[in-house]
């Protein structure tokens, strides 16, 4: 390449007809450039043979202003031209750019310029993933307000990006800690809640003893340590908010087939999700024949065989045996370690009303992350052995025909169907009844979004003794994050100290109530930023559907491969959900 350019340099007349960008690029690597009469500006300055620091500064100053002048005109081209959405990694405002930032944003800027030169209408936005533990930890260590610390960092990093000459569309800038952004994060949460996709339950969670907060499974490394603090993660039972991402596992897995090769990213996503052949069914719990008002989700590896269940098997570590409740005391009376133990609890199959005994398993773990499975003797010799040992009854649900195919029997209206047809019919019935029926993998768990920290998006839920958990009405959003003095409430959210904010009126009965004090994991904020970029000043909704339909899917994303099984998964989930809510036309986040 260098040889070719030097040969071209012998013909100065030819060089004068071309952009001086080639020689500028060579100069960045300390190479000597050919002398010719190309002016740097309106002055009589010319490039010297030695590409010195002073020369580089003059070149940068000259082109920096020209690029900034040309950028707005290019960005305002009509939508009759083909579009190109260039999306780059969503930066956390840590205070200073590092070379990873420079690498990513230089690539995205180059591609954005290239596509504009080809005549494309280009969207190349920038913003800030501004909530999170580092700002709160900095506030604790240095006695600073997290918001002031974050704003100062953003201002400095934005100046650095501009000094690099990068041409982002700053009119599209978003900052996740601003109320005009997190109002719509809260709105999306309410939509998920209304769709039955956001719920609160007590469960075993990953607890970071240093940061004093809950971590999602994906934020714990292979050594069982926190991805942020490095501390050994502990297991605790706490009441947490979850998003039911398992309902979309099969959809997200299948949709990978519609995408081009992502240099191994598709395979990473597929392996992380796992094979989605089973599903959860909800069972109504009874103790000694009495309903207790609680449901138990249990996993069936072959959903079509659910009518052949003999028992529901739970692990000794299951929340029913660990959390402070009368159920724990009842079940512990029947628990013997390393032995399958029948209990006085039963689960009602909501498909047919059949009562199925609950058994505490002799095992300490099931496949993947499962803690409750449906025992089906027709499919498993191990399940059959447990059922026989405990004297449990079950139905034989499969009949083999002369041609070797299997059909269902003793399964009410599903009798006579082939296994595949029966599975689809039973899954649909469960979904229609709202009791499960979504294919997923044993490797997947619902997305835990609760964090017991201050610097995050408040969860828009109010707890009332009369009404229970009540969503904040959409018209009352945003639930603003209050100013507080102390950020060190150990094991509890610091928001509990904001008495005026914490104590409120129930939106439903107007009686005394208290706000939810957990805040959302920052991955919720960053799971939809690519939509907000499109319509960042919209005060009526998260984004305009027509604008999203024009710009989506993203044409080019540039970021680290380390986000392939976490950030990308959540972003794809939100995109699929928004499509189901008729908020967007396209189901996929990116086409490349």
Image (tube, rainbow, N blue to C red):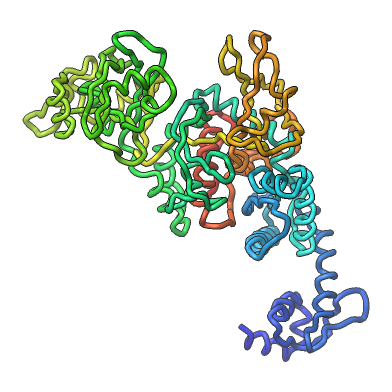
Q: Position of residue 526 (x, y in %)?
A: 61, 43
Give the total number of marks visible in the rendering: 0
Quadrant assignment for the N terminus: bottom right
Residue 44 relative to residue 66: left or right = right
Toward which corner of the image does residue 589 lie, by quadrant?
Answer: top right
Whether residue 46 is situated above or below residue 136 in the rendered picture:
below
Residue 148 relative to residue 463: left or right = right
- At 13% across and 26% down in the image, what residue appears? 389
Q: Which residue occupies the extreme right position in the image?
A: 43
Toward which corner of the image does residue 13 lie, by quadrant?
Answer: bottom right
Whether residue 330 is situated above or below residue 439 in the rendered picture:
above
- At 26% across and 14% down in the image, what residue appears? 355
- At 51% across and 25% down in the image, what residue appears? 200
Residue 429 relative to residue 236: left or right = left
Q: Position of residue 442 (x, y in %)?
A: 34, 38
Is residue 592 visible in the rendered image? The answer is: no
Is residue 554 visible in the rendered image? The answer is: yes
In the image, 18 versus 390, the foreground residue is 390
In the image, 570 versus 360, the foreground residue is 360
- At 19% across and 19% down in the image, what residue appears? 415
In the image, 34 versus 221, the foreground residue is 221
Q: Position of residue 390 (x, y in %)?
A: 16, 23
Residue 199 relative to residue 88: left or right = left
Q: Position of residue 327 (x, y in %)?
A: 37, 19
In the image, 205 versus 354, the foreground residue is 205
């Amino acid at each position: 390449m260098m040889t070719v350019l030097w040969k071209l340099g012998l013909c100065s007349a030819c060089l004068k007809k071309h952009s001086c960008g080639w020689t500028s690029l060579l100069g960045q690597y300390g190479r000597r450039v050919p002398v010719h009469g190309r002016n740097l500006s309106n002055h009589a300055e010319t490039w010297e043979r030695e590409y010195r620091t002073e020369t580089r500064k003059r070149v940068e100053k000259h082109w920096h202003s020209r690029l900034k002048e040309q950028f707005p005109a290019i960005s305002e081209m009509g939508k009759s031209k083909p579009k190109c959405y260039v999306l780059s990694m969503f930066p956390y405002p840590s205070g200073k750019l590092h070379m990873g930032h420079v690498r990513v944003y230089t690539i995205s800027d180059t591609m954005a310029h290239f596509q504009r030169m080809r005549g494309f209408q280009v969207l190349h936005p920038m913003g800030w993933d501004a909530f999170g533990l580092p700002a709160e930890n900095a506030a604790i260590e240095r006695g600073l307000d997290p918001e002031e610390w974050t704003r100062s960092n953003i201002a400095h990093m934005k100046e650095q990006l501009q000094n690099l000459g990068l041409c982002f569309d700053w009119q599209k800038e978003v900052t996740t800690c601003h109320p005009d952004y997190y109002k719509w994060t809260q709105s999306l949460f309410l939509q998920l809640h209304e769709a039955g996709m956001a719920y609160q339950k007590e469960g075993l969670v990953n607890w970071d003893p240093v940061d004093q907060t809950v971590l999602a499974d994906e934020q714990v490394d292979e050594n069982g340590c926190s991805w942020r603090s490095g501390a050994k993660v502990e297991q605790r039972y706490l009441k947490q908010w979850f998003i039911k991402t398992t309902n979309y596992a099969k959809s997200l897995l299948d949709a990978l087939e519609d995408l081009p090769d992502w240099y191994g990213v598709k395979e990473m996503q597929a392996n992380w999700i796992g094979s989605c052949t089973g599903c959860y069914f909800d069972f109504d719990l009874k103790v000694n024949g009495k309903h207790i008002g609680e449901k138990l989700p249990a996993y069936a590896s072959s959903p079509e065989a659910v009518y052949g269940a003999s028992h529901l098997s739970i692990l000794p570590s299951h929340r029913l045996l660990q959390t402070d409740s009368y159920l724990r005391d009842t079940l512990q009376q029947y628990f013997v370690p390393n032995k399958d133990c029948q209990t006085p609890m039963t689960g009602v199959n909501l498909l047919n009303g059949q009562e199925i005994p609950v058994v505490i398993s002799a095992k300490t773990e099931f496949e993947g992350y499962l803690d409750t499975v449906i025992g089906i003797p027709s499919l498993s010799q191990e399940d059959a052995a447990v059922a026989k040992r405990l004297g449990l009854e079950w139905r034989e649900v499969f009949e083999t025909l002369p041609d070797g195919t299997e059909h269902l029997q003793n399964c009410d209206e599903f009798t006579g169907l082939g296994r595949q047809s029966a599975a689809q019919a039973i899954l649909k019935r469960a979904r229609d009844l709202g009791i499960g029926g979504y294919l997923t993998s044993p490797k997947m768990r619902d997305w835990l979004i609760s964090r017991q920290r201050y610097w995050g998006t408040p969860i828009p839920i109010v707890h009332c003794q009369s009404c229970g958990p009540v969503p904040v009405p959409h018209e009352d959003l945003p639930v603003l994050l209050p100013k507080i003095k102390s950020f060190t409430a150990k094991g509890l959210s610091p928001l509990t100290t904001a008495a005026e904010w914490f104590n409120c009126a129930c939106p439903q009965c107007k009686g005394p109530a208290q706000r939810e004090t957990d805040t959302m994991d920052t991955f919720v904020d960053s799971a939809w930023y690519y939509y907000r970029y499109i319509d960042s000043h919209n005060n009526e909704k998260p984004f305009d559907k027509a604008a999203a339909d024009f710009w989506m899917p993203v044409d080019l994303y540039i970021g680290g491969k380390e986000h392939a099984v976490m950030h990308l998964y959540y972003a794809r989930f939100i995109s699929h959900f928004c499509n189901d809510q008729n908020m967007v036309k396209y189901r996929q986040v990116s086409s490349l």
